[in-house]
Amino acid sequence: MDARACPTVLDVEASGFGRNSYPIEVGFVLPDGHSYCTLVRPETHWTHWDANAETVHHIPRALILERGLPVLEVARKLNAQLAGQVVYSDGWANDYSWLGALFDCADMTPSFRLENLRALLNETEADQWHTVKALVSSERGAQRHRASSDARLLQLTLLRLRNADQAGQK
């Protein structure tokens, strides 16, 4: 399948929104369905914590401190698995900033390019996005609000829209 039909999709969960927030979990799903997800151990200067964000992602700070991988290890794993790819995110502005914080702290450059998922959608698909995403989510049943699960939902939504487009063109 070409990248337009089934791209790699990435999602980032964070300590909050806005200034001083940082990534706490990164997950992605490749075109073949392989997924990867990891918690990110905060750097010592990453202290911002928004309780409202925690109610959305259900990841307590104590958990990321205990089980999160070091920033350098996460950056290396992302680069190894995503090298040379264009990777898509639906929260591009936030995810770009959070990945930037991760790679800056690791003193590394991403080996992949992050793009806005919206760039893959035509106007009809963009208009139908939220409706189709809600339908796909409902069909999947209860899922954890976690980075790789969210990335898979986005990928499946895009595939559903692509399949509808192809069916309509026949």
Image (tube, rainbow, N blue to C red):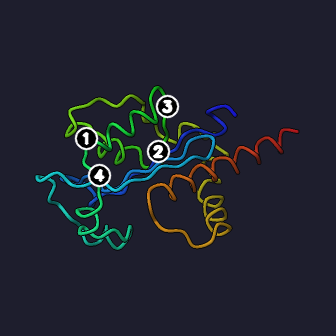
Q: CA distance from mark 2 to mark 4?
A: 22 Å
Q: Residues within 10 Å of mark 3 (few under 14, many from 20)?
A: some
- Residue closer to the observer: 89 or 168: 89
In the picture, measured across the screen, residue 10 lies left or right of residue 165, that is: left
Q: Amino acid at mark 3?
A: Val
Q: Residues within 10 Å of mark 4 (few under 14, many from 20)?
A: some
SS state under label 2? strand
Q: Residue at x 67, y 46 (%)?
A: 124
The disc placed on residue 69 is: 4
SS state under label 3? strand
**Circle 4/circle 3 CB separation < 8 Å:** no
Label whose residue precedes the other's in the sequence (2 or 1): 1
Q: CA distance from mark 3 to mark 1?
A: 21 Å
Q: Amino acid at mark 2?
A: Ser
In the picture, measured across the screen, residue 84 lies left or right of residue 50, that is: right
Q: Quadrant of residue 114?
A: top left
Q: Residues within 10 Å of mark 1 (few under 14, many from 20)?
A: some
Q: Which residue is mark 1?
A: 72
SS state under label 4? loop
Q: Nearer the viewer, mark 4 or mark 3?
A: 4
Of all residues, the one furthest to the right in this rendering is 170
Q: Which residue is mark 3?
A: 86
Residue 98: image location, x then y, percent = 30, 46
Label whose residue precedes the other's in the sequence (3 or 1): 1
Q: Nearer the viewer, mark 3 or mark 1?
A: 1
SS state under label 1? helix
- Residue closer to the observer: 7 or 97: 7
In the picture, measured across the screen, residue 3 lies left or right of residue 47, that is: right
Of all residues, the one furthest to the top in this rendering is 84
Label whose residue precedes the other's in the sequence (4 or 3): 4
Q: Which residue is mark 2?
A: 89
Q: Amino acid at mark 1?
A: Leu
